[in-house]
Structures are given as structure tokens and as C-alpha cells.
Image (cartoon, grey):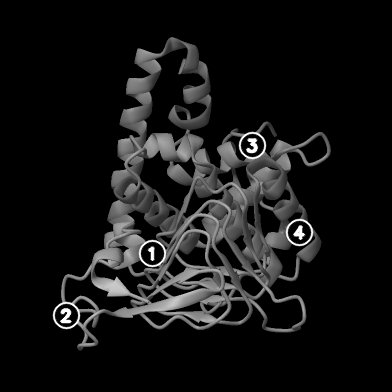
Amino acid sequence: MPAGQPFTASTTSSASNNHHLPPDIVPTFPPPESVDDESWVWSQIKAQTHRDAESEPALASYLYATVLSHPSLQRSLSFHLANKLCSSTLLSTLLYDLFVDSFAAHPTLRLAAVADLLAAKKRDPACVSFSHCLLNYKGFLAIQAHRVSHVLWCQDRKPLALALQSRVADVFAVDIHPAARVGKGILLDHATGVVIGETAVIGNNVSILHHVTLGGTGKAVGDRHPKIGDGVLIGAGATILGNVKIGEGAKIGAGSLVLIDVPARLTAVGNPARLIGRKDGGGESESERGGEGEVLAGESMDHTSFIATWII
């Protein structure tokens, strides 16, 4: 079956039918607003793609094949990933079936993809449209492929999960171990050179720039990689090593080497990284305590505001 051909129940592999995951493996993201977001985002993508096809005829065939010919976001995304990640021996037809089946069996994967699209459009000024992110943002595509490889890993289909990881690393220059757990609303900005280790955990609404490493120290075994809380911002070229905890809303400065825990809403900068504290030594502000209406660093993408009010 050519990649992109209508997918029917007969094309679903018997192995996949026997590998449904419990909710704790693929967490449930709360509907109904997420379902509404999915429908709205897909309508926006189709409208934007139709506009681009009319304004740039050279792309019309590509845009029709990748987006406009498909009835849903999950089919379009599956087709696009399959054609990006296929090789002479790992066929696009096999990958298309794998992606479609995974998205169909685990709706939370689709909802996470929508959250990632919304995050990219909101946080990245260079993201001109949802369709641009879907088609061209390799960080977005790498995360979606990783989520499928994570499902495979949890189903004990480890050789296929590792093969998919290898293709993602080859094509997108993003290396995420299939066992790593990643939340929703993730932005891998530029994405080149991102490395995320086996036991790493990344929360929701996290933004990570290029050449970031979430690695081990090289001397530990077992649970040995960083745990990143919700709303964390990790700057370009930062390295976080070991089973350390980065608290909710924390910032990791560009180029920093972090070997220690970083409490919530603090900033770590330097090599080795040091924590930045209140200049006046006073109590926390409402925003630092997580007050109502707070926008965490991972969502604001604010890398530098701490400089005027905080000292080492």
C-alpha cells in the first residue's frame, strides 16, 4: 500500500492490536478542550496550506500530497513522518501504517501533537503558521516520532523503537532515547544537536533550544538522567547531567553545565552552573510563587529578564 493511501482495519498489524498500553504509560490529556483544539488546528492547517499552494505553484503538488489529500491531522502527520524517515530498507509504507496505527490506538498522542503545534506558534516568532510547523519544524517532527517510539518501547518492541530512534537522529539530528518520557506542549526550537537520555523525564510546556544535552554523568547506572519540571526553559548549548531535578518554571542559561538540582523558578547559569538568587534577599513575588495568571519561563521564552533583578 503506498504511503498515504486510505488506511483500513485490514491494514492494521495483528501485533499492534495486542499491545494496548495502560493509561500510566500514555497519560490521558484532558478533553474536551483538547479535542476542540485538534479540530480547529487542523482546519487552520488546511486553510494555510491551500493559501500557500495557490501562492506558490511549485509547492502545490507537495502540499496536496502531504496535507490537502488527507482527511485528518493524524493521517497527514503520519504520511509526512513516513516519507521523512523512510530509507531503502525501512519503507514508507511500513512507517505510515505504524504511525497511523499508533495515533489511532492512543488519542493522547494526537492531542500532544496539537499542544506542540500550539506551543510553537505561540512561543516562536519565526513560526508563521501551523502548516509551517507541521511541514518544516524538525523539532516538532522529531518529538512526534519519539512519542511513537516510546509507545513501541513500552510494548517491548524495542528493536523497532531503536530503529526509529536511529532514523530520527539521522534525519533530524535529534537523539531521544525511546524510553525517555516527554510531556505535551513541547518546543524544540531549532532542535539540531538535542540529546535526551534513556531515563530522562520532561514535563509539560517545556522549551528546549538547540544543542541541549540531558545526559548521564558517565559513572552511574539505572535512573541516571535529568528530570525536567513543567514550564522549564533550557537555553542553547546547555548541558544537564545526572539524575538532577529542574523545578517548575526554572531557567537554564545558554551554555550552562548543570550538575545540581535547580529549585522551581530559579535560574542556573555558568560552567559549572550556579543558582541565581534574589538581589534584595527578600521573599518571593507572586509570580515566583506561582500566582494566578503566571506565565512560566518555558512558555514566555524569556531568557534574560533575571539579569536586572537577580545577582549571583
The reply to whether the C-beta atoms of the residues labelled 1 and 2 are less than 8 Å apart is no
Please state if 197 lies on the left or on the right of 60 as rendered.
right
Give the secondary structure at mark 2. Answer: loop
- The residue that disc 2 covers is 286
- The residue that disc 4 covers is 162
Q: Around disc 2, counting alpha carbons within 10 Å, would you say few (fewer than 14), some (14 to 19), or many (20 or more)?
A: few
Distance from label 1 to label 4 (Cα)? 26 Å
For badge 1, the amino acid type reads Asn
Closer to us: mark 1 or mark 3? Answer: 1
User: Depth check: 268 or 124 in front?
Assistant: 268
The reply to whether the C-beta atoms of the residues labelled 1 and 3 are less than 8 Å apart is no
Q: Is residue 15 above or below residue 215?
A: above
User: Depth check: 11 or 162 in front?
Assistant: 162
Give the secondary structure at mark 3. Answer: helix
Q: Around disc 1, counting alpha carbons within 10 Å, would you say few (fewer than 14), some (14 to 19), or many (20 or more)?
A: many
x and y percent of residue 210 in the render?
53, 51
Q: Is residue 70 above or below residue 145?
A: above
Quadrant hosting residue 217: bottom right
Distance from label 1 to label 3 (Cα)? 26 Å
| Sequence order check, earlier mark of 1 and 4 | 4
- The residue that disc 3 covers is 84
- The residue that disc 1 covers is 205
| Sequence order check, earlier mark of 1 and 3 | 3
The reply to whether the C-beta atoms of the residues labelled 4 and 2 are less than 8 Å apart is no
The extreme right residue here reads 89
Distance from label 2 to label 3 (Cα)? 45 Å
| Sequence order check, earlier mark of 4 and 2 | 4
| Sequence order check, earlier mark of 4 and 3 | 3
Give the secondary structure at mark 1. Answer: loop
For badge 3, the amino acid type reads Lys
Q: Name the residue: 54% across, 43% down.
A: 138
Closer to us: mark 4 or mark 2? Answer: 2
